[in-house]
Amino acid sequence: MNQFYKLLTLLLFVFISGSAFAQGLTTSSMSGEVYDMTAEPLPGATVIAIHEPTGTQYGVATLPDGSFKIPNMKIGGPYRITVTFVGFIQEQLYVEKLQLGENFSFTIALMEESTSLGEVEVVASKSDDAEKTGAATYVKGEQLRELPSIARSQQDFTRLTPQSDGFSFGGRNSLYNNFSLDGSVFNNSYGLDVPTPGGQTGAQPVSLDAIDQIQVSMAPFDVRQGGFTGAGINAVTRSGTNEISASVYHFFRNENFVGEKVSDVKVPNLDFSTNTSGFRVGGPIIKNKLFFFVNGELERRNELATGYVASNSENQGDPNATTVSESDIIAVQNHFRNQYNYDPGAYQGYFHETYNDKILIKLDWSINDKNNFSIRYNYLKSWKDILPHPEALGGRAPEPFRLAFENASYRINNNINSIIGELNSQLSNNLFNKLVVGYSAFRDFRDPKTKNFPTINILDENGQIAIFAGSELFSTENVLNQDVFQINDNLTIVKDKHMFTVGTNFEYFSFENSFNLFYYPQYFAASVDDFLNNTYVDAGVIDDFTPIIDDANQKPLNITNVEVAQWAIYGQDEFTVNSKFKLTAGLRIDIPLYFSDINGDPRVDGYDGWVDENGNPAEFKASEWPDSKVLWSPRVGFNYKPLETNKLTVRGGTGIFTGRIPFVWLGNQAGNARFTPGYTFQVNSTADDFKFPQVWKTNLAIDYSTDNNWTFTGELLYGKDVNAVVHRNYNMNVPTERLSGTGDDRLIFTDFSDVNIYSTDPDSETFLDAGAILLDNTSKGYQFNVTGQVSKSFENGLNFMAAYTYLDSKDLTSIPAEIAADAFQRNVVAGNPNNPDYSWSRYGMEHRLIASFNYAKSYSKDKFRTSIGMFYEIGSGGRYNMVYATAPDAAASINGDNIAFNDLIYIPANSSDINFGTVDVNGAGVEAADAAQQWAALDAFISSNDYLDSRRGKYFERNGGQLPWFAQMDIKFLQDFNFIAAGKTNTIQLSVDILNFGNLLNSDWGVRQILSTNSPITYTGTDNNNVPYFNFNTDLKDSYTDNVSLVSKWQMQIGVRYIFN
């Protein structure tokens, strides 16, 4: 059976199973009980809720116990609720707003008609409690409008989650989140660079003006929510109403809107300008029936690509003047043009551009009082000019010792077309259905500014790349096409005190990735003179590159295809035991499915010399996907209000959450399953029994509301990894010897040949560089969060929130890269890299304190309105490592694994714990003449760092160091000028957003710190007796220095908006 029929069969099964699903919620719900005045239930009472902005109506009859439930209701409001029963007086309840994913619950008692002549009206502005169980944060529309944001990104608002740090939540990798838009998958599912689509170009895939609310769920014990082990971040877009509402806007900033001073250091800004313009409009097509919403936005940014310049007689002493002389680089530029008929572009002063256009169109159709349909289309076209990679393969971006020509840059493109439809139906009084179908196409590709030309590196006298030109190494035919199809159907059955949900979820992912490293040859010239004489290292004289280019263009492209799916089925019972206690219990089953084939190599699969992390013989099947494993996720949650006043809520739950992996980890295997004659960077495989990530989360929280509406929350959240991810090298022996003669006695490989087992292929010789990397599971890892939070909404329009979170998080590896070999090699160790230490996770802050407020005031008979919003954050700095640097004439690393910069330092307790010196050509140690001075300087350096001082006589723990604490305040000012036009209020609004406001007031405030170096000790070699020798730079005094980049400077953006109503 071919792949098409496999997929068709599975889809038919999904439809036939006729069940339910919701990865991200898009609606709210309402429930309650109707009694008479003697507390007897009134079965058959009619409850009608009308969403007044659109006239959408929801209606049910109460069940035999007098209860009712209405799921799948529009968020927002206000709602007018009418309750009627024959022989009783009608009552009305007004609800200001329904929040995303929350349930509004109320109890109402009807009076018999004989007891009164008039109608009784009851008014409520909000529910007593959202009835949530697990940890979640809801960002409301007014917060999106009034809190500071320059990038206009969701991240500026998800940071209101106390347990967040950037896009990391609760101490977990941001790649384990699930981003959804209107409940549909909207991730960068392949996982390159950033977790959100459009992120490579810096674009926001959806304008902030199109978003109504945002929900961050870290532990929702509702089994309908899945696809993540970090957090589910769901944004719900705006909809049109019966009233025409529109806005046009423009935002602007440039280099003059950025601070130039960090502490006492003046740091000039590169020239740039950013302009963002857009509009939104919504309203009725047919009143009370059909509504539209449209948002369009474009952003243009122009910026100086680099401030580095060639040196000449006039810029001596300029910190931006490189060691590359202007006369040399002009000669190189002219030689390219005259000898090779190639224009490398400018060498300095050139500008890069960023461009993105986005459109969102949404239609909402109230078909009748039983069916509501919506369809949304969104489009993104974006690109960004980028310099050559600053680090990979030695780095080629401009540096103090290097210049790169303009045409060595590339343009990254991120384009999206996405359409999603949702149908909410009431099938009967107690049967509800929600169907979602969607398709998204993500097109990411690089457009190198140089095509059909080699990569040219011109070296300086130190062997460093000083001048770079030609093709960017990673960009030729670099294309990623992602297609995502999803179908969800949600069936809810209400019976007595139970609300049953059964469901299925099917998501299909197709990836086509073209990656062609070194598609055009790379050449090195040992000097400028050699280049001008057309002479290249190991290649000799090349006067014409045309034949070489023609030959390269005949090579086949390296294209890999990966087709996978994730299918889930689940069932759940939400049991309202009584008005005080609700219990939710459910079971979710996720099954990963693999559709594509791998073009494997029998020599890889058949080799019998692979060994596991313990040195035991092991299989390594690069041509086979892992088995499809059934992943079970049972969950239970509760919400309990023990007091009559309902002011105290105890809530929580426990259960397993199943997520996805970044599918590039599977792409690694599909693209690296064969040996290449001569040189093979890596081969990849996945363990036969590999399971998608799973974590067992337990949450317990207490919410208490005072009589004057202060709300206090204490929350515990613990996550234990069930199936975490680890990369291992099955081409690496187990080290058996140890260092001696110092305090550092780590395990070592005594010869490089002990490391790479498979170095020759009997049919065609190959060198296996990075190894045979296996994607495997581990159960080691946990995250423990403790949060205290206080909030209040004042009657004068002030909203306030403050929270503190403590985080303790550990793992076996924090997965520091998307390429398998890099993920393995960059996981720092103090011994055998195949058995990494169980240590601190790199994600999250140990201590984080946040506060936010927004306040608005209207005056002069509502002609003016002023608002101010603030977000304040204090946190312990990010985690870091200290590793050994390696002297040029020493082995590649201290443990002999030939992996540089992955060996954690040993912190000597005293001078006898370390040898200062070198190793001569005969393998004998030579003590440094200034050994005493080096020790005195190192001893002082260790004492100046509290963490280093506490680890004397021990190894630096992975991610054990923490940067100094930081504090930052961001603010937003809005000034509205209201006037009447055509009988309605219109508004001109001016806005000012300022990030790091404290730095604007004082250049010493808001400054963050970074490491002076992460390699304070240099390894110089190991003698014949396995005794290591080291050097320490005596000029190194402090561990930290001010970070003079943008994060330590104030930034401002101004805007103007016209609002039509």
Image: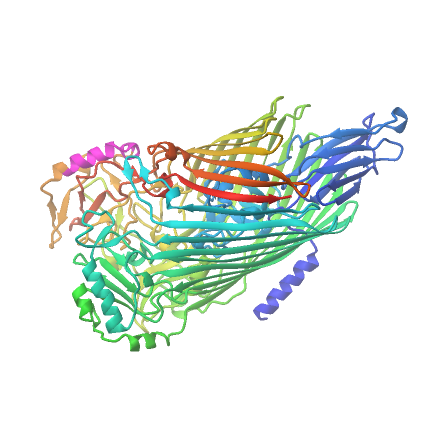
Q: Nearer the viewer, residue 994 or 991?
A: 991
Question: Which quadrant of the view contains residue 497?
Answer: top right
The quarter of the rendered structure image containing the N terminus is bottom right
Q: Considering only vertical position in the picture, is 776 above or below 1014?
A: below
Residue 212 place in picture, x, y as percent: 60, 44
**Viewed as shown, does residue 895 lie left or right of 1029?**
right
Image point (64%, 33%), residue name: 639
Q: Nearer the viewer, residue 369 or 102?
A: 369
Image point (26%, 43%), residue name: 1013
Tell me, yes or no, whether the highlighted magenta stretch contains residue 290: no
Q: Considering only vertical position in the picture, is 451 above or below 173?
A: below
Residue 964 place in picture, x, y as percent: 34, 34
Image point (67%, 63%), residue name: 12
Q: Nearer the viewer, residue 820 or 428?
A: 428
Specify the color scheme: rainbow
Question: Which quadrant of the view contains residue 584?
Answer: top right
Query: How many numbered callouts?
Result: 0
Q: Nearer the viewer, residue 934 or 396?
A: 396
The quarter of the rendered structure image containing the C terminus is top right
On the question of residue 228 being in view, the answer is no
Main secondary-structure element of the magenta-colored stretch: helix
Residue 590 place in picture, x, y as percent: 58, 52
**Viewed as shown, does residue 1054 lie left or right of 81?**
left
On the question of residue 105 being in view, the answer is yes
Residue 185 place in picture, x, y as percent: 57, 53
Q: Find the magenta span and give its range.
A: 934-950
